[in-house]
Amino acid sequence: VLLVALLLSACGFSPIYKIDGTRDGSVSLAALALPDTDNGRLLAQALNGRWQADERALFDMRIALDEAARDSQLNEAGVGARIELSYRLRAELHNRQDGTRRSIELRHAANVARSGSGADDLAQKRNQARLAMQVLAEQLVMRLSREGIGGQIDEARP
């Protein structure tokens, strides 16, 4: 079910499930800080419409992204036939009411076949990064929803 939902969202369709604890299917946060990198921009695109800024929200979130690539299936000359890509998203949530912090870590891995062209390899890696950021965005929103974080509002704030 999740795979079908991810494929639909990758094609531009809205998710077919409702995010619990939110008003309109988006997560409410006081602020969201993303890295100013290619993957950070891809994650921002994937999160577009999935979160909303709300000054009354209890949490703000800072995200860090890591990407690693390594050759695998080495031949006798030591040249890799595949590239293993791994992505890690670390989100730090700050409760603005009591000052507590908590962390969420999510991972995604992918493999691509190495081609004879460096340009093709780069295009494959970029496409995998785009897909990985969509997957990580979905996982993050679902995790925040499941833990009830995205819908908590400070009633004392106007």
Image: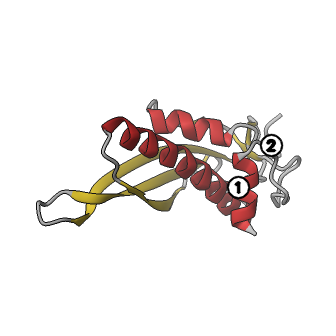
State which mark lies toward you, 1 or 2: 1
Q: Residue at x 31, y 38 (%)?
A: 118
State whether residue 28 is above or below residue 141: above
Give percent across and percent down for residue 44: 60, 36
State whether residue 105 is above or below residue 92: below
Q: What label sits on residue 7 in the rendered view?
A: 1
Q: CA distance from mark 1 to mark 2?
A: 40 Å
Question: In the current view of this chain or complex, which residue is farthest to the front?
Answer: 116
Residue 35 in sight in this render = no
Residue that carries the numbered disc 2 in the rendered image? 156
Q: Residue at x 80, y 43 (%)?
A: 156
Question: In the current view of this chain or complex, which residue is farthest to the top?
Answer: 36
Of 43 and 101, the residue lying toward us: 43
Query: Which amino acid, by three-letter code, is at mark 1?
Result: Leu
Give percent across and percent down for residue 26: 79, 46
Q: Quadrant of the C terminus?
A: top right
Q: Residue at x 81, y 46 (%)?
A: 13
Of 62 and 94, the residue lying toward us: 62
SS category of the residue bearing label 1: helix
> Position of 48 compared to 72: left or right?
right
Query: Which amino acid, by three-letter code, is at mark 2?
Result: Ala
